[in-house]
Image (cartoon, rainbow, N blue to C red):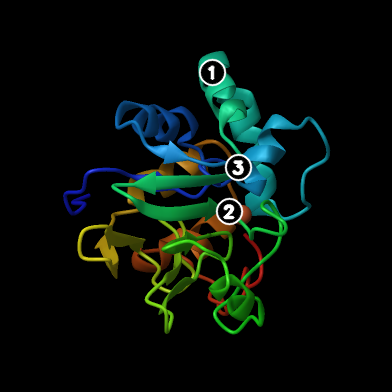
């Protein structure tokens, strides 16, 4: 996968909890010194409580709980729920869900919450959780950013989605990089994943794909 060059990677959580490349993802984030926060799926992995009845979520959480190394579990537990940081004087707030409920609230592009976010004193507020991109420049020149999802975009399947932020030019743009999901699908199926994995990732692969795949996970993250 070719990613545009950048000085820092900011990751908005849910590094685990879908699919099966558990330690590979965390090892990569650690190797590049990514700045991370915790998402609701990461929390589900850390908690020993019951998991969602959703097949995809249950599979991802169970695989992660089974395979996560002690070192990577410790790293995950150390990630904050929200993070305010300054990048060359550019102030940014990172949360997974929302500033009011960092793990679980969904803020979509039509949410009234966007108006409330505009009043926050940050140059950029970035959140995730919806797997849907949202990029807004406010009248004050601030950015409201949901980069979508690297591993499971719900707007551009087959692409890893993110946002490239320039602190120098105070600009932001959406970036989409195609990624081949075939190896991941095969690995998940080897570990017992059902047809949902093809519905979620396999739209470009040969084989059975159910109808309605774009709606089956519309409002969850
Ligand atoms: Fe999430």
Q: Which mark is residue 118?
A: none
Extreme-right residue of the structure: 50
Say which of 104 and 184 sits in front.
104
Q: Are marks 1 and 2 in contact (CB under 8 Å)?
A: no
Q: Which residue is the site of mark 2?
A: 96
Q: At which x and y percent is residue 10?
A: 39, 47
How many neighbours does mark 3 have within 10 angstroms: few (below 14), some (14-19), or many (20 or more)?
A: many
Q: Secondary structure under badge 3?
A: helix
Q: Position of 20 compared to 50: left or right?
A: left
Task: Please tell me whether residue 211 is drawn above or below residue 57 in the rendered image.
Answer: below
Q: Answer yes or no: disc 1 within 8 Å of ligand 1.
A: no
Q: Secondary structure under badge 2?
A: loop
Q: Which residue is the site of mark 1?
A: 69
Residue 177 in view here? yes
* Quadrant position of residue 81: top right
Q: Which residue is the site of mark 3?
A: 60
Q: Answer yes or no: disc 2 within 8 Å of ligand 1.
A: yes
Figure quarter occupied by ligand 1: bottom right
Residue at the location (58% across, 23% down)? 73
The quarter of the image holding the C terminus is bottom right
Q: CA distance from mark 1 to mark 2?
A: 23 Å
Marked residue nearer the N-terminal end (3 or 1): 3
């Amino acid at each position: 996968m070719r990613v545009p060059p950048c000085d820092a990677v900011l990751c908005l959580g849910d590094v685990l909890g879908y699919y099966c490349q558990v330690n590979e993802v965390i090892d990569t984030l650690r190797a590049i010194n990514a700045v991370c926060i915790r998402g609701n799926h990461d929390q589900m992995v850390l908690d020993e409580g019951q998991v969602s009845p959703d097949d995809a979520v249950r599979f991802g959480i169970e695989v992660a709980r089974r395979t996560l190394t002690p070192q990577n579990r410790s790293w995950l537990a150390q990630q904050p729920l929200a993070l305010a940081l300054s990048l060359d004087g550019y102030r940014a707030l990172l949360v997974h869900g929302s500033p009011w409920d960092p793990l679980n609230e969904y803020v979509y592009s039509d949410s009234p919450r966007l108006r409330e976010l505009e009043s926050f004193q940050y140059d950029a507020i970035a959140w995730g959780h919806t797997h849907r991109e949202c990029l807004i420049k406010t009248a004050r020149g601030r950015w409201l950013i949901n980069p979508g999802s690297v591993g499971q975009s719900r707007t551009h399947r087959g692409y890893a989605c993110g946002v490239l932020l320039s602190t120098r030019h105070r600009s932001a743009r959406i970036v989409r990089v195609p990624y081949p999901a075939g190896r991941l699908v095969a690995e998940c199926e080897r570990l017992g994943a059902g047809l949902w994995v093809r519905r979620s990732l396999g739209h470009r692969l040969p084989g059975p794909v159910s109808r309605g795949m774009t709606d089956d996970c519309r409002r969850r993250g």
